[in-house]
Image: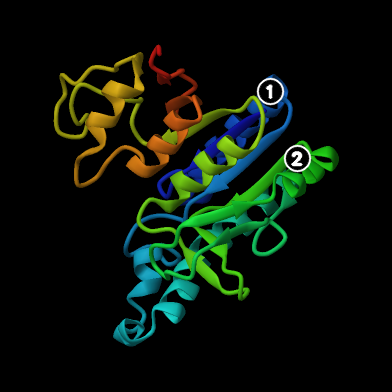
Amino acid sequence: MIIQKFGGIAMQSKASRKHCLLHIKRAIKEHGKTIVVVSAMGRFGDAYATDTLLNITDAFSTSTKAKDLVAACGELIAAAVLSSELKQSGIDNLLLYGAPLGITTTNNFGDAEIIDISEETLLSALNHYDCIVVPGFQGITDEGEIATLGRGGSDLTAAVLGATLPNVLIEYYKDVPGVMTGDPHLDNDAELIRELPYSEFLTLLNSVHPLIQKKAAEMAQQHHLTLHIRNVFSLESGTVVYPDED
């Protein structure tokens, strides 16, 4: 089983999503059951990006509940779009979100904690579908309200699903080749680090813009999961992050 998480740049346009489709088709062929977690499409200024939605009105500052509801829409739209494009390309899949997904959170809107996830629901869905598409970044409170998981929360969604299900590999798709010795957008001499343990990887996530959410990486480390950090626009294997020896 494999979980693939596609970020905002990967989901940004139909052209970029074609690369997502190729990776998903390969994953189904190589690993069988595949869960796809998506972020909102693009970055600030793109129509359905989270920061764009949050800037519709400054009145969201008066209601964290309303702010979370609109913030979650970006991932919901992205999941619906990718699910439809998968179907159009011949890949049957299940779009799973909200209460049926079974991710229960606290009601700390904007930075909710996951308190439960229904393994039974996920396994039942995987019995009927080889591919499930899930919007990241969100869960449902006991009162049935949408709550988001904080900045980078889609990464955490993927990690939590990986921690819940048996024998899972997680792939995080980015616009860089993997973990690098420097920022490849600024440093032409930056080189790919092909593998490294969590103890080294976590220290690299203490930046303003970490490669993946540190909380997600810590969750994956706690459950001894192997991560692949890969470039969505390439078939190269990227970086493998592996558990430290006890």
Which residue is under mark 2?
91
| Secondary element at image label 1 | helix
Quadrant in which the N terminus appears: top right
Q: In the drawing, does residue 161 fall left or right of residue 91?
A: left
Quadrant in which the C terminus appears: top left
* Residue 49 placement: quadrant: bottom left
Q: Are marks 1 and 2 in contact (CB under 8 Å)?
A: no
Measuring from the top left, give residue 203's x and y in whole percent. Answer: 23, 30
**Residue 92 seen in this snapshot:** no
Q: What residue is at 18 percent from the left and 26 percent from the top? A: 182
Foreground of the two, 126 or 243:
243
Q: As shown in the figure, which amino acid type bears the numbered disc 1?
A: His
**Residue 65 seen in this snapshot:** yes
Q: How crowded is the residue under tag 1: few (<14 C-alpha within 10 Å), some, or many (20+)? A: some
Q: What residue is at 21 percent from the left and 34 percent from the top? A: 185
| Secondary element at image label 2 | loop
Measuring from the top left, give residue 129's x and y in whole percent. Answer: 80, 41
Foreground of the two, 165 or 171:
165
Foreground of the two, 246 or 242:
246
Measuring from the top left, give residue 29's x and y in whole percent. Answer: 72, 23
Q: In the drawing, does residue 139 fall left or right of residue 66?
A: right
Which residue is under mark 1?
31
How far apart, in angstroms, are the residues tagged by discs 1 and 2? 15 Å
* Residue 145 placement: quadrant: bottom right
Q: As shown in the figure, which amino acid type bears the numbered disc 2?
A: Ile
N-terminal-most mark, 1 or 2 = 1
In this rendering, the label closer to the viewer, 1 or 2: 1
Q: How crowded is the residue under tag 2: few (<14 C-alpha within 10 Å), some, or many (20+)? A: some
Q: In the drawing, does residue 95 fall left or right of residue 204?
A: right
Foreground of the two, 210 or 191:
210
Q: Which mark is residue 121?
A: none
